[in-house]
Image: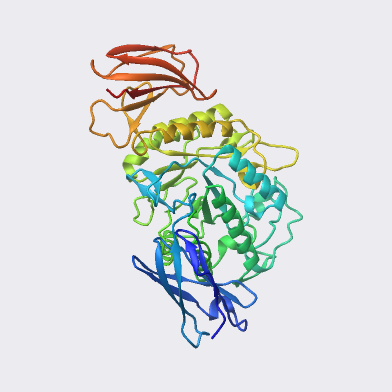
């Protein structure tokens, strides 16, 4: 029997892996399918394996329960039964399991701990140098982001025309020596000059991405993997249906056992003109059938929304469609789709010529608070020009703006919400008010977060009833201060500093 290598113990929600030597003749990526069946007291899971190069096949499994498990490996080159046992120990303290949809509009880890998404976009940070990757991880930690969107394929777009550190397939790319930020559109979608074998993956490319996913997991950050995108000069966006399906199956087999993975079928799916809705639904079917852990799934737009009512979509991943508005529609999208609304792109803080990349830091922070108070989850990006030509939105590295410094403050506010998650509440036409999602029918809520956005009132009157005591705090969302103003009852007035980006928090005082 082939010598299998595996651990006899693993913690709940960690990756258990078995390594199996196998044949290298023919095409191991297509000729020798390998899979595993894992049986415990509370679950039976079947997971596909994959070829990892140099005669090594792997099958991975993420156990959802503690206790004893039995496994059996299936592969055409295994002439004898390949099976065994291992034990699942309690989860590590920092591992709360995969993120799930909770309470219709929100998220929680599988152990029930609330998860409040404060994400960023950094398309190809994982395909940069080791030094820049280390810088990115330090920046993510300092900024307290807990989700990052990034691509599996390399990216060809303005301010990002260099070659990646590796490619996903065996072969060679086209000559990119004539590329500039002025003519990059000429090469979008070009396939001439590339020489790839789309039936043979480059395992080193995927192993490196796994290293990055593990580093994110160590920091408590969700890896929102963008599986397809249109910014391409290598031909990866123009593969045939058979080539696409092979890629999807390989990606799911490699990455699905990591508890901190989310799936984004595409970034700006509606710019991939060679793909049809039938294609996207086929990819979703592969994902739903081959990912046994049911990781979160969505698809991102440029102009036209995908139908987020589709049953395979777990949450809305939205790019704003209006130059000015986006956060302001979060509550409407909640009503329409009855799913969590994640504004993964509400434009970027920066100074580019493009309207999507020149928000002020103040406006980015405003959009974050507006989104959160309307019951959604905001996403950050940063696009400042600099002599090095390194923009966070694509390359990662060091953050140069000001908005990122203020997101941890908002995250702490979100974590202090009673129950689980904020819901929009129509307190008045001239402010944005959030209350606990868990209190829809309570006449006087236990908690109100009133945000005044770009308006600058010098006072605000409140009246809920004549018997409830409220502890009042005035919040400066830009300067990150919380000023306690005492306890009030009945009709009362709160003095404000007459500047923008202020909020008032009212918390019912227990008797």
Q: Relative to 55, say whether 466 is above or below.
A: above
Q: Nearer the viewer, residue 116 or 158?
A: 116
Examine the rendered structure and indicate whether residue 501 appears above or below residue 192.
Answer: above
Residue 12 locus on image (x, y percent): 45, 59
x and y, in percent, of residue 82 in the image: 48, 81
Residue 354 visible in the displayed image = yes
Q: How many marks?
A: 0
The colour scheme used to paint the residues is rainbow
Q: State the residue lying farthest toward the bottom.
A: 79
Residue in front for this viewpoint, 335 or 195: 335
Q: Is residue 235 visible?
A: no
x, y percent for residue 244? 52, 66
Q: Quarter of the image for the C terminus: give it.
A: top left
> Residue at the location (38% across, 33% down)?
417
Q: Is residue 143 left or right of residue 470?
A: right
At a point 43% along the width and 14% down the height, the residue shown is: 457
Front residue of 163/459: it is 459
Q: Is residue 209 above or below residue 491?
A: below
Left or right: 4 as drawn, with respect to 45: right
To which quarter of the image does residue 238 belong? bottom right
Query: Image point 58% across, 58% down: which residue?
Result: 152
Residue 170 left/right relative to 104: right
Q: Specify the quadrant that holds the N terminus.
A: bottom right
Q: Quadrant of residue 23?
A: bottom right
């Amino acid at each position: 029997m082939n010598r299998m290598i595996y651990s006899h113990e693993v913690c709940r929600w960690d990756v258990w892996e078995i390594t199996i030597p196998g044949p290298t003749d023919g095409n191991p990526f297509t000729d020798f399918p390998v899979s595993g069946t894992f049986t415990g007291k509370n679950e039976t899971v079947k997971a596909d394996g994959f070829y990892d190069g140099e005669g090594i096949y792997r099958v991975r499994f993420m156990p959802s329960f503690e206790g004893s498990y039995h496994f059996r490996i299936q592969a055409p080159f295994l002439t004898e039964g390949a099976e065994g046992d291992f034990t699942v120990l309690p989860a590590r303290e920092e591992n709360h399991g995969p993120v799930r949809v909770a309470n219709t509009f929100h998220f929680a880890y599988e152990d029930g701990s609330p998860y409040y998404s404060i994400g960023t976009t950094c398309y190809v940070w994982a395909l940069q140098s080791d030094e820049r990757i280390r810088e990115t991880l330090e920046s993510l930690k300092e900024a307290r982001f807990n989700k990052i969107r990034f691509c599996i394929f390399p990216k060809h777009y303005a301010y990002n025309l260099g070659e990646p550190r590796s490619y996903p397939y065996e072969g060679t790319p086209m000559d990119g020596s004539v590329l500039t930020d002025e003519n990059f559109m000429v090469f979008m979608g070009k396939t001439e000059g590339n020489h790839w074998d789309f039936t043979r993956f480059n395992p080193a490319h995927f192993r490196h991405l796994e290293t990055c996913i593990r580093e994110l997991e160590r920091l408590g950050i969700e890896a929102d993997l963008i599986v397809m995108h249109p910014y391409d000069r290598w031909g990866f966006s123009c593969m045939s249906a058979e080539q696409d399906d092979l890629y999807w199956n390989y990606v799911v087999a490699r990455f699905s056992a990591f508890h901190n993975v989310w799936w984004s079928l595409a970034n700006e799916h509606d710019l991939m003109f060679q793909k049809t809705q039938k294609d996207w639904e086929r990819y979703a079917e592969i994902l739903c059938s081959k990912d046994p852990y049911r990781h979160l799934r969505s698809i991102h737009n440029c102009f036209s929304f995908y139908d987020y009512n589709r049953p395979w979509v777990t949450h809305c991943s939205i790019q704003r469609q209006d130059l000015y508005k986006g956060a302001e529609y979060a509550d409407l999208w909640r009503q329409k789709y009855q799913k969590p609304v994640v504004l993964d792109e509400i434009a970027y803080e920066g100074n580019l010529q493009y309207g999507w990349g020149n928000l002020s830091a103040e406006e980015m922070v405003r959009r974050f608070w507006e989104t959160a108070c309307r019951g959604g989850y905001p996403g950050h990006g940063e696009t400042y020009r600099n002599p090095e030509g390194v923009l966070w939105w694509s390359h990662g590295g060091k953050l140069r703006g000001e908005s990122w410094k203020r997101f941890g403050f908002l995250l702490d506010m979100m974590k202090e919400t009673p129950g689980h998650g904020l819901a929009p509440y129509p307190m008045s036409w001239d402010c944005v008010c959030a209350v606990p999602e868990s209190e829809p029918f309570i006449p006087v809520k236990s908690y109100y977060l009133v945000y005044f956005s770009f308006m600058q009132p010098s006072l605000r009157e409140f009246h809920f009833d004549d018997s409830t005591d409220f502890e009042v705090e005035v919040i400066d969302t830009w300067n990150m201060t919380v000023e306690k103003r005492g306890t009030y009852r009945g009709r009362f007035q709160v003095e404000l500093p007459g500047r923008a980006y202020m909020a008032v928090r009212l918390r019912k005082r227990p008797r």
